[in-house]
Image: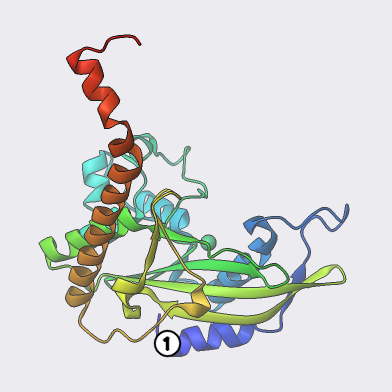
Amino acid sequence: MTPALFNELVASIKGRTVERPNKADSGTLSGHAAGEPFEKLAYHLLKEKFPTKVFKQYEYLNELYLKNPKKISTADRYALFNSPVAMFLLIRGDKATRDWNPANIFEEKQDDTADILWHEGDNFDIIDVKTRNMSKKGMPPNIISAYKLAQACALMIDNQDFMSVDIHYLEVEWKEEDGFLRCSDANWKDLFKSNPASLYINWAAAMQIQFHVSELTQDFDGTREQWARAYITAFVKSAEARCDKMYKTYILPFKKYVLEEENGWIPL
Ligand SMILES: [Ca+2]
């Protein structure tokens, strides 16, 4: 999706209100579910305008497999993607893909990479919507698995497949307003314009990259291959630092007991 279209989308979401979830019982607005109506709003605004280019990720896969009824094996279905990187980021697992049939189609899944998928020509734009309750001081949300992203970058380099996939984040900031949630601000960012060395990987939180979308830097101006290589370098450095910390905390203080166990110890 072009920057102009993202700017337009953001402008059309700012100031909008959605119904408050749990309105009837005035229940708590907890976690990410609270902002979900904004994710739906973003999808509907785009789908209305670009019905042939905008999909939910599972919706795209369902249409792809429905349109190719003779492709039945997982390998055949995976081969429907021209791009190894797009395939890697968008497919469901082997078993789910094998079990797919017109009477057993995919439904939305929490860990799908894209909330909204833009497909135009050979390009996929993976759009992840993050909603943020501005009356709470929230931790930066989980963005994407650092490992999955490293694998995607390695696939880009190995297959020289750099431009099939874009990844964008749309952040909707909201506040509660008598029975409604109002979008107080919205932002969008391009993952591949961020500085790979500045991405924070939270190894303890399932190795998720975490940031607030509005705070992501956008000053990287190299090629996609340069980004992929810089990211893998940052990822490996971070993994090495994690190993080092694991060693110092969880191995070193206990190592002597292991040696004693191996070499024989005498009760005091
Ligand atoms: Ca999301």
Quadrant position of residue 223: bottom left
Q: x and y percent of residue 151 in the render?
A: 24, 55
Question: Which residue appears at 12% of the width and 62% of the height?
Answer: 159
Q: Residue at x 41, y 59 (%)?
A: 144
Q: How many marks?
A: 1
- For mark 1, what is the residue? 3
Q: Nearer the viewer, residue 155 or 123?
A: 155
Q: Is residue 192 left or right of residue 176?
A: left
What is the crowding at mark 1: few (fewer than 14 residues within 10 Å), some, or many (at least 20)? few
Q: Amino acid at mark 1?
A: Pro
Q: Residue furthest top?
A: 267
Depth check, front residue: 76 or 151: 151
Describe residue 228's horizontal placement relative to residue 100 as left or right.
Answer: left
Q: Quadrant of residue 9?
A: bottom right
Which residue shows up at 45% across the image and 90% down it? 4
Label 1: which secondary element: helix
The N terminus: image quadrant: bottom left
Residue 107, placed above or below residue 179: above
Q: Position of residue 83 (x, y in %)?
A: 22, 62
**Residue 72, quarter of picture:** top left
Residue 82, how many percent across, how many down?
A: 21, 61
Nearer-the-camera pick, 188 or 60: 188
